[in-house]
Amino acid sequence: MSSVWRNGTLVPGDASPGAFPPGAALFETLAVRQGRVECLADHLARLARGLDHLGLPRGPLAAGDLAAWRDAFAALGKVDGVLRLVVGPGFEELGLRALLPSPDTFHLRNLRTARDAPEWLPRPKSAPWANSLAAAVELRQSGAGPGVEGVQLDALGRVSEGSRSSLAWVEDGELRLPDDATGRLPGTAQAQLAAAAGLPVRAVASPVPVRADAVLLLRSTLPGGGAPVASWRDAAGAELWLAADLAPPRALLARLAAHRAQRSVSLA
């Protein structure tokens, strides 16, 4: 069985997606490449909002103690992978799983699993992650390959987020993000893109943006934090949107990658 770092001790545990320890409440995932993680502070700030709402204390990892992070990373083997910090009543747990190859571009497909209503706003990244997990299961059962991400719409048919990703698009010279009202998670890479893009930013509650000039998929564990989207289909497979040129989203993603690289820290 694999091991996790729980309250300062290496113990048996499982850091795979969908597997959470009893009593889990909130979690964050980060990629570690060449011993470095990007934008750790952003993840911990999102985690802190949830912990404060629940009245849970912050242990050394949740508080951002870099010495504690380095001790945990060393105990887990000091290898590249996906770190997952889970915090609940009386515990914090850091696990490490394999970092899989990332597609260069993505294709989107709408899912039938609607995005559920959030527990509170801004939405926490909470375990057991039931609605997003159901969306991921639907996508997997559809036979989609690793370069396809499923899109959840809310009950009103408005774009919320992917099963594992945040979304953004460029339309009429603006960077547009799904509004909180759609139930989307306040994505860390999504917020970083908004800060780095150099475009006006607008939150919208809208159906699939069929007139978008570019669509971007944001995920903090992807290299640079995101990837361009080449196409978007409905749940039946009919094409809704097709990229005319992938150069513009790649330029925006290069800005995002530079922003994230400047805010990386070493755990080695």
Image: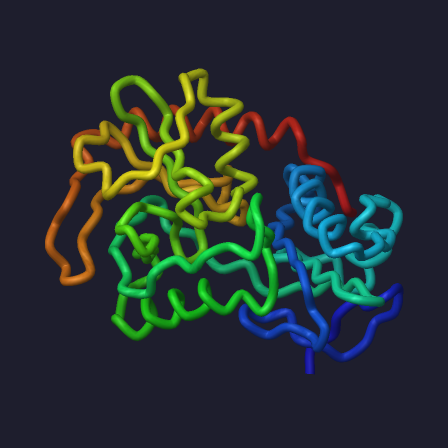
Which residue occupies the extreme bottom position in the image? 1
- Which residue is located at x 30 percent, y 25 percent? 248
Would you place residue 191 above or below residue 11 in this image?
A: above
Would you place residue 199 above or below residue 136 in this image?
A: above
In the displayed structure, does residue 201 sit left or right of residue 156? right
- Which residue is located at x 31 percent, y 48 percent? 106
Q: Which quarter of the image is occupied by the N terminus?
A: bottom right
User: Who is closer to the viewer here, 125 or 13?
Assistant: 125
Instruction: Give the percent coordinates (x, y) of residue 234.
Output: 18, 55
Report which quarter residue 137 is drawn in: bottom left
User: Who is closer to the viewer here, 111 or 205?
Assistant: 205
Instruction: Give the percent coordinates (x, y) of residue 244.
Output: 16, 31
Report which quarter residue 95 is drawn in: bottom right
- Which residue is located at x 32 percent, y 33 percent? 169
Instruction: Give the percent coordinates (x, y) of residue 259.
Output: 57, 26
Instruction: Give the percent coordinates (x, y) of residue 83.
Output: 66, 57
Would you place residue 229 above or below residue 89 in this image?
A: above
- Which residue is located at x 43 percent, y 43 percent? 181
